[in-house]
Structure formats: structure tokens, C-alpha cells
Amino acid sequence: MAAGSRPSQKPDRPIYAFLDRYATLIVLVLLILLNIAITPNFLSVQTLNVNLTQVCTIVIVAVGMTLVIATGGIDLSVGSLMAIAGALAPMIFMGKIFGIEHVGLAVGLAIILSVAVAGALGAFNGWLVATFHIQPIVATLVLFIAGRGIAQVMTNGNLQVFSVPEFQFIGLGRILGLPFQVIIMAVVVVWAAWMLRRTVFGRQILAIGGNEKAAELAGVPVGRVKIAVYAISGLLAGIAGLIVIAINSASDANLVGLGMELDAIAAVAVGGTLLSGGRASIWGTLLGALTIQIVRYTLLANGVPDAAAMVVKAAIIIAAVWIQRKARAS
Amino acid sequence: GLPTLEVKDTYKVGFAQTESNNPWRLAQTNSMQAEAEKRGWQLVYTDAAGSAAKQVADVNSMIAQGVDLIFLAPREEIPLIPAIKAAKGAGIPVILLDRNVDQSLAKAGEDYVTFIGSDFIEEGRRVAEWLVNNKPGGGKIIELEGTAGSSPANDRKEGFDTFIADHASFEIVASQTGDFARDKGRQVAETLLQAHPDADVIYAHNDEMAIGAISAVEAAGKVPGKDVLILSIDGGREILQLVIDGKVAAVCECNPRFGPKAFDTAAAYANGEDIPGKIINPDNFYDASNAADLIDTAY
Amino acid sequence: MTQPPLLRIDNLHKRFGGTVALDGAEIEVAPGEVHALVGQNGAGKSTLIKILTGFIPGDDGEITFEGAPFSVGSPQAAQAAGISTIYQEINLVPTLSVTENICLGREIRRRGLLDWRGMRAEAERLLAKFNMSIDVSRPLSDFSTATQQMIAIARAIGFSARLVIMDEPTSSLDEREAAVLFDVIRGLRDEGVSVIFVSHKLDELYEVCDRVTIMRDGRTIRACAMAEIGKLDLVSTMLGREISRSGGRTTAFAGDHDHDVGDTILSAEGLKDGAHVRDVHFSVRKGEIVGFAGLLGAGRTETAKLVFGAARPEGGEIRFDGAGFAPQTPADAINAGIGFCTEDRKVEGIVPDMSIAENMMLALMPKLARAGILDEKRQARIVEKFIASLGIKCAGPGQKIRELSGGNQQKVLLGRWLAMSPRLLILDEPTRGIDVGAKAEIQKLVNTLADDGLAVLMISSELEEVSEGADRVFVLREGLTVAELTNGEINEERILAAMAHGGGEPSVAEA
Amino acid sequence: MAGNRGLMGSYGVVVALMLVILFGWLRYDNFLSPFNVMSVLRYNSMFALVALGMCFVIMTEGIDLSVGANAAMSSVVAAHASHYGLVPGLAAGVGAGLVVGLLNGLIVTRLKIMPFIATLATMLAAGGMALLLSGNQSIPVSYATSFTWLGQGNLFGLPVPALIAAVAYVIGSVILNRTSAGRTVLAIGGNEEATRMMGLPVERTLMVTYIACGGLAGLAGVILAAQFGAGQPIEGKGWELFAIASVVVGGTLLTGGVGSVGATLAGVLLLGVLFTILNFENGKGWISLSAYWQSVIRGFFLLVVVLFQARLARKHAAQPAVSAT
Ligand SMILES: Nc1ncnc2c1ncn2[C@@H]1O[C@H](COP(=O)(O)OP(=O)(O)OP(=O)(O)O)[C@@H](O)[C@H]1O
Ligand SMILES: Nc1ncnc2c1ncn2[C@@H]1O[C@H](COP(=O)(O)OP(=O)(O)OP(=O)(O)O)[C@@H](O)[C@H]1O
Ligand SMILES: [Mg+2]
Ligand SMILES: [Mg+2]
């Protein structure tokens, strides 16, 4: 039984209702104010730029994670799937698998194929969860362990270095001054938020997370929805993997997406989505990821050593989730 | 005394690698495997995935398999001592590669044959020395550290920081970990450059982070090599090309090609030759003056 | 009252957000008395009980127990103080064995460690009071709802409590089992234990209760001896309006079974699932209400699930609309025009965190969508309509369904299926846990639907509901159809006879 | 034992363990040599302890991601304290673990934050503390005191850590099967709200479970320090996943409510022996099995085991239940 279903202790107070809506946003604004006060050179376009580009991949992955968590699941394999997509794409556009003369074609094929493979592996996760009723943590643990191994085996662990501007546009390019990866992120966020609220699929995701048995008896195709959700998570992880390697002009199967699952889950939780499923907030996830990013930025920019930063981050995650929960409970 | 190694045509030797998650380690492993193949020795290879405890277990399983000699690239100085003692107990000689162990607990020539490797502190010191000599005006330095708690990170920091401390015109304005990784190194460099726009030197503990730092400098609208000097350690081919291109100022080499020397030492030990307790790899130092000439020798 | 009361609650208040659940409720229970607590769905009965037992905190009010002020922070403390409770929704742990479900909290120990043998014996002893002999080392989830309910009751009376509270204990019991329960309650009364008994089945109240407290809208309206108040009086006090009854009927089904019965829409032959359904046949025609009668565990729910694609048959044939029908999933059955309102609303019905509107539209939603995009305006209209027509007591269509009282949740679920305009509606215990007022409305509604040509398959453990409501009755026993009764033959005696020992094989091991 | 009937795969894991051992014995020389057996037991005893705590937490339908970082931090604390002797070292290490466990328990029961997030945060915090307390360095333990006996010593010819783990498992098994606290753990995992309604001490039991899990991680940290002669701030990465995998391979469901202590031990040993086999396989041929293939094989192995269990569980569910009224 979820903690959220426990009866509330607090009488109704408008302050809580306000907090409920805007808790993460308030935390974020406070952090920004704090930075303006203490962090040198904070108010500049470049700061915004740095933070937005650094948070992109986490947000993209976290959106997929939000959907998975909304069905009552979890996806530990995202980091490994990023590595697989990141390993595969250069192999294709650098002609290691099949020779394609035309750069544009090769890059297009590389992007489509590697993202599709990540999506297919995501669907495999969903298949394990839906068909065999394997618990999501365990089902996705399989690819968490094996997936990175697959990426490493594909490349023999070697770094793949490249310089292909056509491909690297997804990480480094700009449209109307906006980094292309930020545009991808925005599209993903807006699409997911809309989908969750306005479509049958979104409703079904929430129904499954809320009460799977009831959803099934109300005609929701539980298995199909789950497979689709894990596949989306895989696709988004694949896209994030490509962005990471495009920025770095190199793909390192050992490191691409390492630890991403925890970052994404933390963003989802700080954003106010319950890990027990049945509820989800995509905007919350965006704010959660931004919050964590700003915390990271603040600590780094102010020279807090890594060890102390870890403790501070822990405290902020707990505080943010607790405020959320508190606001909810009323 | 040390266990002995009899003279044979071929040996079954173990190589207990620490981890294989970066190009340097891969180059080291490849070098060891290539050398074993060349000599027709059997190599029992294990990978501890970054865990000292697992590495001890790996060594124990080599002992159980009855290898003739163990090459050990210890994850850490102290925790690997039990492995060395166990090997000695089982009559198997050990040769340490690239990192040493705590000398108060185990001694060369007594508990293990010898240590072959570089001196991480010295590497850091040489980079600092180059900087002081080549940037007379002084500077503000951003340091990108390796994985917190790992000995190359600790030592490369110590060697560099100690030297810089004696030169008042230089200041380390920020020092944060980039985990030896390109992506993390880039993100940390981006942030630190924002917070310290006046920084004009970036010292990275390895090539990967240095390459990440180049992207960060460029993203901040500055010119690497001109506005910001970038210094690194390891000296792989990719970074040498960047030295030639003028984006990286100087690199201290840390050569991962241990194979020939390691196997030579083992053979010499079997022959009963006298082995010194410490064999330091001669590491090159690259800057614009010699990079183009030496790039073909880099790993 | 001569003795000082065992329990006295005064002026109890409780708000949930905007909803006032209790608004000055009071109750007084004497020692050794069986006290009925009645009221419409949402009147606040369960809330009162939960506050008393410390499961949720009250906002204001005084509780006196055994002459002293009483306030506990947890069910555990209430139990320690001598109050033992069976909550409305069965609340045991499905993964634990029956023994543990009965004995945890007052374990038998030997040398500090659990004495499993002693505990099993204790569990068996308590269950024997209910004429039950089951394998007590099996997990609870192996047993049917009814059996679980009996186990919950056995657990509660196992504590030597001064007060036993039962919130709708009989809602999933059949009459035979209820009768056993009443014997046990009388036994408790004879031992001087007080019982608070909540039920929507009026006959039961008159059978076992000494006194009654009637609640409405969170307030106590009246308290008196059971004998002082007639049934009609009781109901009108509860509902807050005058009611009149027609021709001696106890349900609201129309007097005559005169729907325009059309062609057979659903039929099944030789149905079996390898476990609880062994050989079931039945048929339903358009505009007809077909009743499924049987003791608990007779296999009625399982049969319905086979038809609905929620379980797969191992043999037999189902025909729907003249063609062979083998739904693989509930979605198949829904697409064919079948609706299925389940008996266990908490586990198989509601999606607790979703709103009333979302819950109601869950099955219909895909049909109202264009290219997968929801048509929210149309949904809102439909929801408004059903909230009004079913008389759902709520703050609005956006309220979370878990905040509704049990009965109102049931109405939302009915709405889910009615909104679909199904061709065949399967109702499993449709009026379980529903107050008399709402019950009549639902029964009337079902009747009207059948008049309009809907085929209804109604599973009910309430004999009157089946005998008065159904045009045709199939009686199931131990997974077999043992009798089919048509219009003229339907009466309670015949159904009972068939349920107990009608038809085919001799019955096995009657307890 | 009553209540364990829902537990599938506990026989499966024992059978699998025997098969894997048999395979190793037939294929490799010295596989069952006393040296190898002892060193496998010595090494895996740390994981066994961590998995035991994890098993209890998982039975409450919780999870504890902080165990690895906790063990690392405790090893540092133990190393510092080892200079005062065996008992102070042991007490300090276990104490540090208990503190993390207490923190987990408080966050889960008081702040009512989901265990996954709560322990994700304490994992970060404990990892940070480990680095802070050690100044980013391994901390040598004292060889002057008998502290290292806890990791390197033998008793009755068996490794001390293995004996410690064995005692912990016996105690764990008795608690689970023969005390009401153990059954309450299962009840909470089966249905927390119902457990509360049944009047069982939910909060207290959860607290104790998380504290115990922390304490066991601390004990594993003590053994880590004693066995390798140093407190290691950056060890323990991935221990939580190893522990979760062992528990799951042992047939305990992550959905809580069912579980077995013995099968968890078998799960730990199964994964541990598998590691050893991969190492031996490397020594077998002239071509080394790359480390990368090892992760692929481990993932695949996990997949096979859980698929096997899913099948067993389904078979069990299909069995008809009789309920006579
Ligand atoms: N957790 C909650 N949050 C919000 N409202 C609640 C909650 N629990 C109960 N309510 C509201 O309090 C009122 C009383 O509910 P309660 O469950 O006590 O009714 P009841 O008399 O037991 O009804 P029933 O006969 O249907 O069980 C209802 O209007 C219900 O919607
Ligand atoms: N989850 C379950 N696990 C094992 N056996 C079950 C389960 N659910 C039901 N049963 C058994 O299946 C048999 C048939 O149950 P079913 O629910 O179909 O009966 P029913 O006539 O509908 O009675 P009820 O009114 O209790 O639903 C019962 O004997 C019951 O014990
Ligand atoms: Mg109620
Ligand atoms: Mg039924």
C-alpha cells in the first residue's frame, strides 16, 4: 500500500493548496535568488545556456521515466540504452557496419536505427513486465547490467572519436539562437504533457498505475500500454544518448549515460510524481530536473567539494520531496 | 624471501586489471594481451570493475587456478595487500603495474617482485613546472580532478598543487572532480568557466577531461590555447593532435604500454637476474615544440 | 438506561477538505448490547468508526469508554484498550496464511518463539465457531471474498475485547453464513461483550440488534431500541423523507416480469475453467434480467469472468449475438458490447487516485476519442448526467473517487458501464454495500434498462433481489448449473432448495 | 513453514546453485579446493550480510539503495576506530551503519517518503560522508590490534566473516519465521494499510527493519575494512544492486509480503559462484573472455533466473485452491 494513501493529519489550509501546485517552482525560484546573491557572474545568458544544455538529456530521459513510473513501474536500463544508441550511431555513420557514401543519408540512417534499437530494447523491457509479470526493477535490471556490456562488446570498449557536423548538429547546432537539443527537450516535454492529459493513451497509463486490475477489467489493453510506455522510455533514452555523444564528438560505451537512471528518477521524484504510480506531472519533472541542475551548478560554482556536495544534494532531494508530499497530504 | 619462478618455455600468468572503463586502461590491457600472445604465454585476465575488494577475490581465483606469476595493477595502495600476501603464501611471485602498494605493509623484493610504473605525483609536478616556466605572467587555474578518492587523482593533484603553492603569481581558483570522463569534465568546466570568467588555465588530470574542457572553452566563446591554456596528463594520440592544433598547451605522458617491459621483467626474474624494487617508466612530456615529431610514438 | 454506558461519543466532527463527514455525531452503547448503526451511504458511519479506533484523527468531539475519556492514536492502541474492529473493506493481509491473519497481534509463544502448532489450533478453533474447516496454513488470498470476511470476523472476536465493531460484515456473506455470524454475535452478547453492527440490510438489524443509532449527513438523528421503531419509520428517518411501499415487495423491481423479451443474445454450454467452474450452462435474452443464484463460491463470479474475457475457459462454448464468442481480454468483450460491474470494487473497480469523471469514463473513453484524443466536453456532459441520475453524493465530478463513501463509489462504477450503453450488462452483487434508498434506485434503473431492451445478467447473494428482479434464474452449485427457473417458478423456497441440494450430484462434505 | 507457501523459486535457486557448483567442479581443476572455497566464502560474506538486510527491507515492500555507500562509510569509521582494538572498531563500524539505517527509517516512517527516493538520497549522503571522513583516501586499519581477525582470521578452520554471516542468517531466519516481528515484516509487505488496521506496530517494525539493514551494512563495512586492511570510501558501488539481485534470485518478491532468508543466502552464493566461474573460465583457454562479455552473461543469467521464477510462480497460481464452507 502506498504511503500516499495514508489518511492525512492536517486540516485544510490554503497555504498547502498553494504549495501543492507550486512547491517545486518555489524551491527553484528560491535557488535562483540564492544564486543571484552568492554566485559570481550568475546573471548572464551564458549561464542560462550552460544550465539548459546540461539539463537537456536528463529531462528527455526523465520524461520517459515519468511515464513508466506513472504505470507503477520503473526503468533502470535507461543509461545502458543511451550507451547502446551512442555506440551504434557512430558505427553506422562512420561506415563500420555498411558503407554509405552520402553523409546525410548515413547520418539519417544512424539516428533512426540507433534510436529504434533503443526503443526496441525498451519494448523488450515492457514485454518482460507485461507478459511475464516480472517486477519492473528486476526486469529492467537485466538490461541495466547486460545493456552496457552489449555496448562495450560492440565497440570492444574503445572510444569512437568522430567529427561529423551533420550528426553533431543535434548536440551542438542552433536554430534561431536556441540550442537544437533544447528544442528537442521542449518538444518532448510539451508532447508528453499534452499526451498524458488529453489522450486516451495518457488516461490509460494513469489508470494502470492507479489500479491495474480495475483498468484491465475496464477494457484497458494493459499489456500493450505497458510495452508502449517502456518503448517510449527506450526511444527517449536513445535520443539522449545521441545528444551526449554529439556534444562530445566521441562515444564512450563505458560512460555514456552512466548513473542516468538515478538522476532521472530523482528528477521525477523532486518533480512531485509519486513512485507508486497512478499520478504524474511532466511539468513537475521538468522543474525537478531544473532544480537538481541548479543545485549542482550552485555547489560547483561556489567551490563546494564533491563529498560535501553529495550530502547537500541528498538533503535537498529529501526536502523537496517532503514539501511535495506535505502539500499533497492536505 | 620471494617465491621463485622456474625457467620454462611458456608460462601461465595472471593479469588482474583494475577496470576497463577508459581508453588508458584499454591500451594497457591490449598491450599486455598482445605481448602474451607474442610470447605464446597464457594470460589469465580479470577485471575488478573498479573494486579493490573484487580485485583481491580475482587474485585469489588466479591463485586457485595455479598461475605461475601475477601481474597486478592494484586499485589501491592498502586494500590489495592481502592479495599480495596470499600470492606470496601460495608461492606465486607478483609484479605490480602502474600503481604501487603501501610500502609500510609490503616491500619490493620481499612481498612482491617489483613495481613498474609512473610516478603520478611527479606527473602533476612536471605539468606545474611547465606552466610556471611558460606563463611568466602568472594565471588563474581551474583544476579538473579525477575520480574522488582514486590514487591518480590524489597524486596528480598533490604534485601539481604543491608546486603551484610556491608560486604566488598562480592561483587555483577552482578544483572539482570531473570523474576522469569527457562529458562530466566538459560540464564541470562549463560551470567553472561561468563562475570564474577570469580563469586562463585549465589543468585536467587526464586527456578525456581535457578534451571535454576544450568544448567548454569554445562554448563559452573563448579560444583554447589563446584565452585559456589547457594542460593534461596521459598523452594519447588524440590529445597530441590537439597539441599540434594548438588547442592544448602541454601534456605529460603516462604510458600505458606496459606489456613488453612487464613480460621482460618476468622473464628476467625467472632467469634469476637482479630486479630493482621500482622500475619507473620514462614518461615523455609534450608541448608544441615536440608533439608533431613524437605523435607516432604515442599510444 | 440503568447501567452506565460502555461507550459514549459526543459531538464528533470531521472534515475532509471541503467535505463534512461528521457534524456532531453521537452514539451511546451499553455493555452487552448489540447496537445497530445505520444511515445512507456517506452518512459518516465508517468515519465515526475510524476515528473511534484511532485510524484517523477526529477534528473535535468527546469519546468516553468504560467511564473514562478515551483517545487513541492507532488501531493498535484501540485493540489494546479492548476495541476490536472489522473495517468495511476487508483488511487482512492476502499474502499471509490464515493462521497469521487470525493470530498476529496476540501470538502464542513458546520459549519466546512463535508456536505455530498452537496458533494453527487456535485459528482452527475460532473458525470452527463459524462451521469452517479450511487449511489454515494457506495464504489468505487463496480463499474467496466470503471466506476472507469470515476470517476477518474470526480474528476480531479472537481478541478478548469489550467492544467489537463490525462495519458491514455481511455485505459479502450469504444468508447461511450470515446466520452463523448472528449466532456468534449473540454468543458475544451473552458473554457481556458489546457489538456495534453496521449494515444496510434491514432484516438483519431486526434479527440481532438491541438498539439502533440512525445517522444522516454526519449527524445523529435518532437513537432508540430496535423494537421501538418500525422498518418504514427507520428507513424514512434514515433518508429524511417519507416513503411508501407497494404491495409487500422488499425490492424496487417492477411488479411484473413483463419486459419485451427478444432473441437470445448470450448463451453458454458446458463451460468450465478447470477449477471453480465445472459445467455451467445458461442463456440471456434481450430485454431480460437473468439471475444467477448460488452460495458463495458456487462459481458465479468465475463464470462471469469467462464471459467477459477476464479468464480463459478450458472447455465449453459461449455464443454471443448468434456467433461463437471467445474474448481474449475484457477489451474484446467491451467492444462486443458487454459491461461487467465487479463485486470487489476496491480491488477490481475503482482507480482510487482518479476523479469520479475519469473513473466513470474509463471504459467509454476510447470510443469518445478522435484519433486517440479525448473529447472532454462530451465526457463532461455524460458524467454530469449520470451523477445526477444515479444521485451520486460528491463535491463534483473532479473529486477523487477514493474520497467517496463505499456506496457512492459503487454508483460511479455502475455509471461506468451504463455510460457505455452496453448490449449485455453483467452485474456482480450490484447492490452490495448500498443503502436502501440507493438500492431501490439502482434496482429501478436496472428494470428500466431491461424494459429498453438491455440484457442483464445479475449475480446476487440477496435472495429477494434475484427472486423479485429476475425473469429467469439459474442456480449454480459447486461449479454446476443445477437448476433453471422460469417466470412462474421463481420463488425463494425453490431457489434455496436448488442452492442447497438441487440438481445433479449429491453434495460433498456439508459442514 | 506457514506463510512461506507463496514463495516460489526458493527450491529453484538451491538446485541452480548445486548445478553451477557441479559444473565448476567438473570443468575446472581446483574449483572445490579448500583455498578457493574459503576465499569465495570470505569475499561473499560481505554481500551475504548486505543481502540479508535487503531481504528484510524488501519483504516490507521497501528497498534500500544506501547499503553500498553505507558499508563504505562504515568501513572508514571502523578503520579509524580499529586503533582502539577489535571491539571498538566493530562497534564504531556497526554503529555508523545503524545511524544510516536510523536515518532511512526516520525518513521513510516520519517524512513518509518512498523508500526508493529516501535511500537514494542517503546513498548520496553516506557516499559523501565516506569521502569527508576519509579525506578521499583509504584509511589503513591497525594491524597492532586484533581488528583484522574479523576479516582475515579463521575459526574452526573457517573464515571468520563467513561465520559471522552464518550466525546472522540463523538469527535472521529465526526472527522471520519464529517471531511476531518477523511476521509483521511480511504483513507490512503484503498490505501495509491492512497491517495497520490489524493493530500491528507498522511504524516501529519499519524503523527496526531499516535500522537492522543499516546495521548489517555497517557490519559488512567492518568486514570490508578488516579483510582488506583499510577503510575504503569508494567501495560498495553497485552492492545494492547485487543485493537486490540476490534477494530476487532467491525468490523473494519485490512487491513484498513473501520472502525467505535461506533462499537469499543461496541467491548470494549463486551469484558469487557465477563470478568465480567466469574468472576460472578466463583461465581456461588462451583467449580471455572479455570483461564486457561478463556483464552480458550476468544480465542474461539474471534474465533466465527470473523468467524461470515467473514460470514457477504462474504454475503455482494456476493450482486450484479449495475452500469448504
Ligand atoms: N479520506 C476521505 N477524504 C475525503 N472525503 C472522505 C474521506 N473519507 C470519507 N469521506 C467522506 O466522508 C463522508 C462519510 O463517509 P463514510 O465512509 O463515513 O460513509 P458511510 O456512512 O460509511 O457510508 P457507506 O454506507 O457507503 O459505507 C462521505 O461523504 C465521504 O465522501
Ligand atoms: N483468488 C482466488 N484464489 C483461489 N481461489 C479463489 C480465488 N477467488 C475465488 N476462489 C475460489 O473460487 C471459487 C468460486 O469463486 P466465485 O467467486 O466464482 O464464486 P461466487 O459464486 O461468485 O461467489 P462470491 O459471491 O463469493 O463471488 C470459490 O470456491 C473460491 O474459494
Ligand atoms: Mg462505510
Ligand atoms: Mg461472486
Image (cartoon, coloured by chain):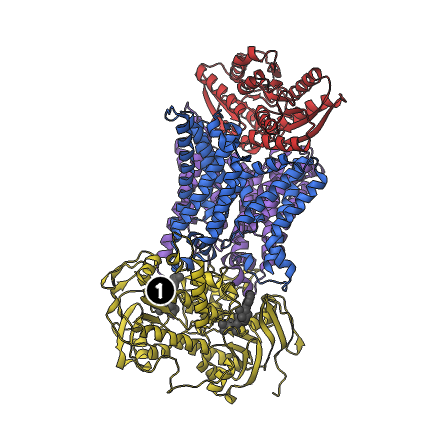
Chain colours: A blue, B red, C yellow, D purple
Q: Residue D224: percent from the left, percent from the top?
A: 60, 37
- Residue B27 as seen in the image, left or right of residue B134: left
Give the farthest residue toward the bottom: C228
Q: Residue C461: percent from the left, percent from the top?
A: 38, 74
Pointer 1: residues within 10 angstroms few (<14), some, or many (20+)? many
Q: Residue A185: percent from the left, percent from the top?
A: 51, 41
Residue D76 seen in this snapshot: no
Image quarter of the C terminus of chain A: bottom right
- Up the image or down, C150 lies above or below B108; here it is below
- Residue A312 as seen in the image, left or right of residue B298: right
Q: Name the one closer to the observer, C386 or B112.
A: C386
- Residue D21 as seen in the image, left or right of residue A33: left
Q: Secondary structure at mark 1?
A: strand
- Up the image or down, C175 lies above or below D55; here it is below
Q: Is mark 1 within 8 Å of ligand 4?
A: no
Give me the chain letter of mark 1: C
For badge 1, the amino acid type reads Gly
Give the farthest residue toward the front: A176
Q: Which residue is mark 1?
A: C339
Q: Name the one closer to the observer, D68 or A90.
A: A90
Residue C115 seen in this snapshot: yes
Q: Residue A141: percent from the left, percent from the top?
A: 47, 42
Q: Which quarter of the rendered image does ligand 4 occupy?
A: bottom left
Q: How many marks?
A: 1
Q: Name the one closer to the observer, A248 or C317.
A: A248
- Up the image or down, B65 lies above or below C462; here it is above
Residue occupying image coordinates x 51% and y 67%: C404
- Up the image or down, C340 lies above or below C63; here it is above
- Residue B116 as seen in the image, left or right of residue D191: right
